[in-house]
Amino acid sequence: MTVITYIQHDGSERMVDADAGLSLMETALKHDIPGIDADCGGGAICGTCHCFVEVSGELPAPDPQETAMLGLRPDRAENSRLACQIVISAGMSDVTVRLPEFQM
Amino acid sequence: MNMPIGASVPNYSGMSLEELDVSDPRMFQYDYWHALFARLREECPVHFQADSPAGSFWSVTRYEDIVAIECDTEAFSSAPAISMLDPEPDMILRMFIAMDPPEHDDQRRAVHHVVAPRNLQEFETLIRERTVEVLEALPENEPFDWVKLVSRDLTTKMLATLFDYPWDERNSLTEWSDMFTSDVRLTGGEGATREVIIEHITACLQRFTELWHERKGDGKETFDLIRMLQADPNTENMVDDPLTYMGNIMLLIVGGNDTTRNSMSGGVVFLNQFPDEMTKVRQNPDLIPSMVSEIIRYQTPLPHMRRTATRDVEFAGKRIAKGEKVVLWYVSGNYDESVIERPNDFWIDRPSVRNHLSFGAGIHRCMGNRLAEMQLRILWEEVLKRFETIELAGEPQRTCNLFIRGFTHLPVRVTRFRS
């Protein structure tokens, strides 16, 4: 079972067991974890599920659309991702998701 | 509003596809656009019109197609303009809404922070105070024009608050905004000529340049959009580049004006048309944020945005030639039954309520969306607290403009709760 730790901007943490097949965004919504707005519902067209992802091992690289949306964030970092674009696969190692100060 | 004598609703179902006129602003003035776009979505979702006051253009009417084009910024450029009209060659304002990556991204990031949620919190108390003042001053039990006394007044005051604009001059902001979007080719004849528009742009730029210089280095610790531009290293010298400064000012003025104003009016109309939804939100005010998103979808205050093909491109079986205008009809996408469940229902707690096209999609998605939502949320929180009834007292009159979907007059009557 993959465990995802969501860390809010104020430092508070929530750990949840992930369901394979759900994205980091869907998992957060399922567990009522704040900090992810997901206006567009998962299409990488709104950018309101921006987060900083820490994981041991490789994640699939962002596609051009995700890269374009990340390019708008003033607080973009090396590990910036859209939570809707990372889907938990079976056997994936644990993930830490740090949430930004705000989504917009 | 009733149509004038001699005018009639076009018989869209009896026309050939070539005869359909998607450049007719009266479809919004008399609210008969549903049948036109329903037919286009069904029979010709990517439609070419050879002739109109704004020239030839393609119309894209399905939700998924609009998103696909917005995301393909390489084939579909936002330059040179994002309405059906091309800019005047001698007055090309530099605004990032009409740019492509990478230039767009740099410019947008530079001003994005002015509407960042962190900064909005600073404005929330002030915006609520102004909203309360406006609502407290409304007459009771007699019809008044909601557009004039609430939507227009409040949006003007909010804009003046955001810019810390001289209070006595605040109506210029709304007049300029109206002027910038009222080109005769968008309004079916009545509107402003290019000379008049350029005159107003010049006056606006002059006033904002004066304000910039007055504020620069005066040591005051107040908070407004001009000072925020001055405080950021990316934009601290923006005034030296007048076309960029004016472009950004215009974007903030227009972006924060018709859009919010018309959603403020639309909400009253929809809650009257769908009284069960009014009951729902009265019983559960926690639904206000969700209702705000539904108001914004249902109103779609900017009915279209436009792109321009950068090369010949095949799209949905059509061949769009380099240089042709591609008009994305958000108002149609927002009522596309293949994506939006029961689109014609105003349904304040619909599933995925934030999933609409009124803010656009992709890298040009509305930068002020959180501000707009906050303004509408505060308005409805304060309205529902105060007024026991908010009823239409006559026929709404709508704006005749292809780029603006809104109201010019909205007769309303309110009664207050007795404590």
Image (tube, grey):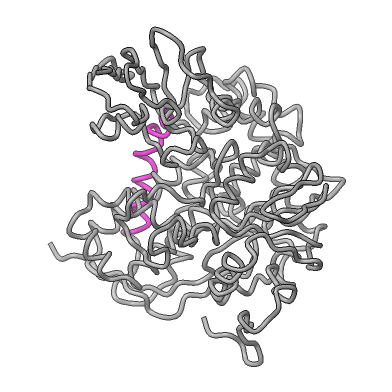
Given residues B159 and A58, the one toward you in this image is: A58
Q: Which residues are magenta?
A: B117-135
**Was residue A9 drawn as part of the magenta stretch in this picture?**
no
Residue B28 locus on image (x, y percent): 58, 70
Residue A37 locus on image (x, y percent): 37, 35
A32 to B139, vertically: above or below: above
What residue lies at 28% left-to-right and 14% top-to-bottom?
A: A11
Count of numbered marks: 0
Residue B240 locus on image (x, y percent): 75, 27
B69 to B279, vertically: above or below: above
Given residues A29 and B403, the one toward you in this image is: A29
Residue B247 locus on image (x, y percent): 70, 39
Given residues B67 and B395, the one toward you in this image is: B67
What residue lies at 66% left-to-right and 92% top-to-bottom?
A: B6
Q: Residue furthest bottom?
A: B5
Q: Is residue B170 visible?
A: yes
**Which quarter of the rendering shows the C terminus of chain B?**
bottom left
Is B138 left, or right, of B317 in this rendering?
A: left
Q: Residue furthest front?
A: A90
What residue lies at 41% left-to-right and 22% top-to-bottom?
A: A51
What residue lies at 65% left-to-right and 53% top-to-bottom?
A: B176
Is B181 left, or right, of A67 in this rendering?
A: right
Q: Which is the main secondary structure of the residues drawn in magenta? A: helix
Q: Residue furthest right?
A: B90
**Was residue B123 drawn as part of the magenta stretch in this picture?**
yes
Q: Place residue A33 in its image quadrant.
A: top left
Q: Place residue B380 in its image quadrant.
A: bottom left
Q: Residue furthest top?
A: A56
